[in-house]
Image (spheres, coloured by chain):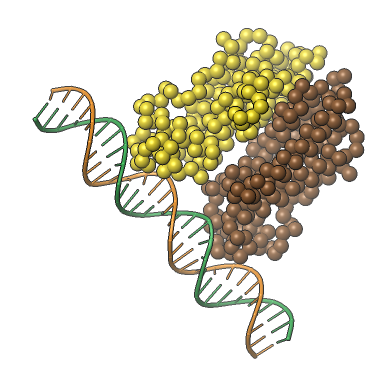
Chain colours: A brown, B yellow, C green, D orange
Amino acid sequence: MSAEAATGEAWEDITPDAARRLVVAAVQAFAERGYHATTTRDIAGRAGMSPAALYIHYKTKEELLYQISRVGHLRSLAMLGEARDGEGGAADRLASAVRAFVRWHAEHHTTGRVVQYELGALAPDHYAEIVVLRRQSEDAIRTIIADGVAAGDFDVPEVSGTTLAVLSLCIDVARWFNPAGRRTPDEVGALYADLVLRMVGAGRR
Amino acid sequence: MSAEAATGEAWEDITPDAARRLVVAAVQAFAERGYHATTTRDIAGRAGMSPAALYIHYKTKEELLYQISRVGHLRSLAMLGEARDGEGGAADRLASAVRAFVRWHAEHHTTGRVVQYELGALAPDHYAEIVVLRRQSEDAIRTIIADGVAAGDFDVPEVSGTTLAVLSLCIDVARWFNPAGRRTPDEVGALYADLVLRMVGAGRR
DNA sequence: TGGAGGGGTGAGCAAGCGCTTAGAGTCCGG
DNA sequence: CCGGACTCTAAGCGCTTGCTCACCCCTCCA
């Protein structure tokens, strides 16, 4: 199945409705201001509730962040794992992975910003768990690139460094993407897929 | 003069010594924890002073951040401007710019993190000023790429998008670079310069 | 020698934070 | 109809924050 079959955004699966509204509000506030500059009063206000209501559904403010981070990372991993295990050569799979990953970060740049840039606010045990997920995502990309090199389809002098570069490109989209800008998520995805294939020297042989 | 002649790190030019120690302490604290999670007590403690001493040299906590951000951005701009105006073809100048920029972000990743990721904590007037500097840095890279396309040395379907991609690569180094890691700043700079030249299709013709 | 100025500290202020608690309202099952 | 569970609010607590102030010490100059 195509890696581009992106999982739905939103947090529709979160119940009850109040818990979902809090998560959505937290994502927006964390993305705009960062975890530490966001207050529980701010989150609750955006969700149309009192600050105390937050603690009915979540143990702490940090647990909200953890939930957002975990779900976001699991989605990333699912997307990249799907691309790695897809059919086709390494070039097709790499292009597919980049298109999907870039598009996700563009379409869900608010979630992306929280997921990628608020790691430092996680409690140590939560952080350790998230790091494992991030490592697995990195491994998925590295595997595709290594496959390409092994098959002679790619010309890559340094697989790990190149893997990091590919991830940097994809992740950083969350930082700069502007929905009001001139490029759609699909357009950025396509451009970046092409740029990445050039980086790995696909098609030079 | 070569763009790689990087300006010195450090903040040696800041006087008096106390003001300099406060800036150095602030850079470290902001890089580790982020602006909002850093307290004035934390900064002052790292500088070996009392919290009140901070206000002898700086009007507010935000002014400290602004100073760090402004100097960092001016250094970036000087570096990139120098590369743009350097001698040689677009490929040489682009490679030079990327090598210098990446190396700077690797060597000074603490400053780099503050400069690139704590923009949201700046006061509106300071933020507006910094955005101008960032735009100029982006323009420097775009100019080199446009020159390459015009000269027929580059094969770039979308100059602006590619410019953003190049900046993403360079900037993101500050986020992940680890001095204890296996790559030196020079090695990352060289790898990234190569990757960027492939991205713009230099040497394909 | 005394005063001014610069640099610094300890103590504190006003504001705000994350989180808790007592009480209220609603809904549902017995 | 009543009691329990769930959800929520108003009010508040203990603590921390950015910043200020009164005072002190040291150096320099007239």
Please indicate, yes or no, whether residue A17 appears anywhere in the rendered image. yes
Q: Is residue C15 above or below residue B184?
A: below
Residue at point 63% right, 55% down? A64
Q: Quadrant of the C terminus of chain A?
A: top right
Residue A195 visible to the viewer: no
Judge left or right: residue B164 versus residue B21. Answer: right
Residue B134 horizontal/vertical position (percent):
57, 28
Where residue A40 appears, x then y in whole percent? 55, 56
Q: Which residue, as the protein is rendered here, is positioned at the far right?
A: A88
- Between A32 and A117, the one lying in front of the other is A117
Q: Which quadrant of the structure image shows residue A163?
A: top right
Q: How many marks do you count on the picture? A: 0
**Would you place residue B3 above or below residue A60 in this image?**
above
How far from the left and from the top, in percent, is residue B119? Answer: 54, 37
The front one of D15 and A97 is D15
Quadrant of residue A84 within the rendered picture: top right
Instruction: Find residue A89 and report its horizontal and vertical position in percent.
Output: 89, 32
Residue B135 or residue A169, whichever sits in front: A169
**Residue drawn 75% across and 40% down?**
A137
Quadrant where the N terminus of chain A sits is: top right
**Rendered image quadrant of residue B76:** top right
A200 w.r.t. D20: above or below: above
Query: Residue sitting at 59 percent across and 15 percent down?
Result: B4
- Give me the residue at 69% from left, 63% from top: A17
